[in-house]
Amino acid sequence: MSTASLPLLIMGPMVRRADAAEVCIQFATSVASQFSIEFDDIDVFSEQQSIALGTHLYLHFVIVKPIAATLPVNQLISYRLLNSNLDVDLSDFCYQGKATPEFVIPQKLEQILHGSCRNPHHPAKDSLVAANDFQQQNRSVNQTGADVLLLSGDQVYADDVAGAMLLAIERLISVLGIYQEQPLAIDLPAQLSEQLYQRHLYLPTVPWQKRNKIGVGYWLKKDEPHFSSLKAANHLIFFEEFIALYLLNFSPLLWDLIDFDSISYQASSPKCQQVFDNEKAALTDFKNGLVHVQVLLANISTLMMFDDHDVTDDWNLTAGWEQVIYQHPVSRRIVNNGLISYWLMQGFGNDAGHKTAALLDAFKTSFSEQKQWQFKAFDKTILEFNHWHYELNTVPKVVVLDTRTHRWRNEQNFNEPSGLLDWERLTELEGSLVTHEQVIIVSPAPVFGVKSIEAIQSLFNICGQPLLVDVENWMAHEGSAKKLLDTFRRDDTPKETLILSGDVHYSFCFSVQKRFGKHPNRIWQLTASGIKNEFPRKLINVLDKLDSILYAPKSPLNFFTKRWQMEVDKHQTIGEGQKYLVSDSAISLIELQQGKLARYQLLHPDNRTTEFDLSND
């Protein structure tokens, strides 16, 4: 397709942060232009923030504010996108029977969609399609459906990229003329097809001569890669690749522009060829579902938070990992590319630019006269930025945690897992919780996880291999675990706290109460993972059974855990084949009544629904 025939709108619109004071609408176009948003029957004005990311790629954020008073809450609002006062055709983004997209400004939360871990080439179906089906059913009978969509991590997999996806990224960079960064000092083969399934061989390593002589790697004379992802064969490297990946994760139109069906690859072995073919088949199914996903994102306020795969596996897991990565210019650059692209495609919309817009000027000055990004100065700026976390002033209040850049590092042993939040941020969290009746916390990793799995992770950590099994649970760090549990045991904490988590690729429902004291506070750990990812089913069934045996309610092993003063009850699924851990891909639906949990379900992409029994029996 010639660039002259590129459509105006190439991604979105996506409704991002929405509250009574303002609404942020995010989208991308192929040309620079002025846009505004109008709400039906509501007097508003628009402010536009645009960022040129390519010759034919412009990212826009339109902030819509009321002319008088505040915007209406808890009711459907219809909106139109205008380009130079002319309507942009949004018919592809409307629910059946609707003339325009509609969304709700959530104030009193009654239904929440939540999920994490959306890997495009995983063979599971995309659960965001199931979420869209749920919304369509509600809108067809003039109900609002879910009030908000919360995505708690791994919206993209920058460290686990399919071969066909990497080739698609290359084509999209060319079609849109996405601006590239200054060349890195990394010796890759000239042709991308020669890099497929080989990129991990060119990523920076620690030479075996510099490794600890106590480790096995030294005596095997084996270099240690900086990046610890086990699936780094096609790890993203360049800034333009990260941007293209985001576009392909959210826009169905772009897959047609690059003629994805014609992408091919001749592998050097039948096994590698089979991997490529299987991944491409999964991606074909993924792209076909995006027509439904784009409707969902245009009709519901969507808030996001990063986890490790949005940047790279094990991101900041240990102080030793950080030391190796950030002291090497290429490794640091790759990680920062992931963080910059997160800011642009996810972070800015979370707070409508209130704090994240402070990065814009420094970012734009990084663009040279040679039309290349030169991020050396900007790297320091974005690494020092510490406002990725945010809150929603809803009822219940929503507190979204950044558990990646506020780490509590172990200063005695740099190879020990860092705490997910440092003392300062944990103290801020404590202040956010007290004096509220109900609060919802979004924590990418579960606070109260499966004890048997955490015990296995602890064993690997004792053996000096925390990166091998992702020791990223809250209880892995003594200081952060104690501070967090002390907060939950306070008498002035909420009577009901919902913790929404993902990360682990299986779903479960736990309820938690402190064993001692009269304050009737209950904590619900609601874990939903993944949207398009799954834990091996046979293994999860074994771990489910093992956990039920070893950590039964009266098991003495419970007293050897850091949370022994908290009574944790596991809740089974309802119906045949009852179980505590559900591996099937899904997105969760949380229903509240008067701010308290009334129902917890999993919506599966094959039209099944799994519900957890919330009773204490």
Image (cartoon, rainbow, N blue to C red):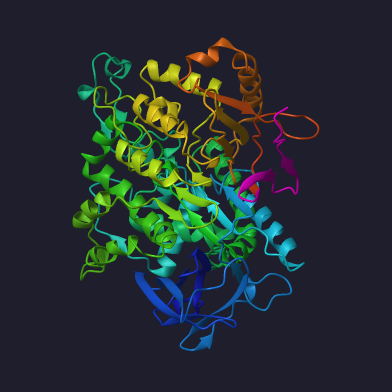
Q: Position of residue 472 (x, y in %)?
A: 43, 31
The foreground one among 446 and 248 is: 446
Residue 600's place in the image compared with 345, above or below, is above
Does residue 197 sit above or below 191 in this rendering?
Answer: above
- Left or right? Give the position of 219 relative to 431: left
Q: Nearer the viewer, residue 529 or 270?
A: 529
The image shows residue 486, relative to residue 67, as above or below, that is above
Q: Is residue 536 left or right of residue 431?
A: right
Image quarter of the C terminus: top right
The image shows residue 228 at horizontal and vertical percentages of 37, 33
Residue interval drawn in magenta: 591-617
Residue extending farthest top: 556
Quarter of the figure with residue 295: bottom right
Q: Nearer the viewer, residue 279 or 500?
A: 500
Q: Residue at x 44, y 59 (%)?
A: 350
**Residue at the far front in the pictured view:** 518
**Can residue 463 be seen from the camera position used here?**
yes
Residue 593 drawn in magenta? yes
| Residue 403 visible in the current orientation | no
- Report the residue that reaches farthest toward the bottom: 85
Count of numbered tags: 0
Image coords of residue 155 (percent x, y): 50, 50
Nearer to me, 530 or 558: 558
From the viewer's perspective, is residue 362 above or below residue 583? below
Q: Quadrant of residue 275?
A: top right
Q: Is residue 607 magenta?
A: yes
Q: Residue at x 22, y 48 (%)?
A: 185
Coordinates of residue 436 in the picture (x, y in percent): 49, 47
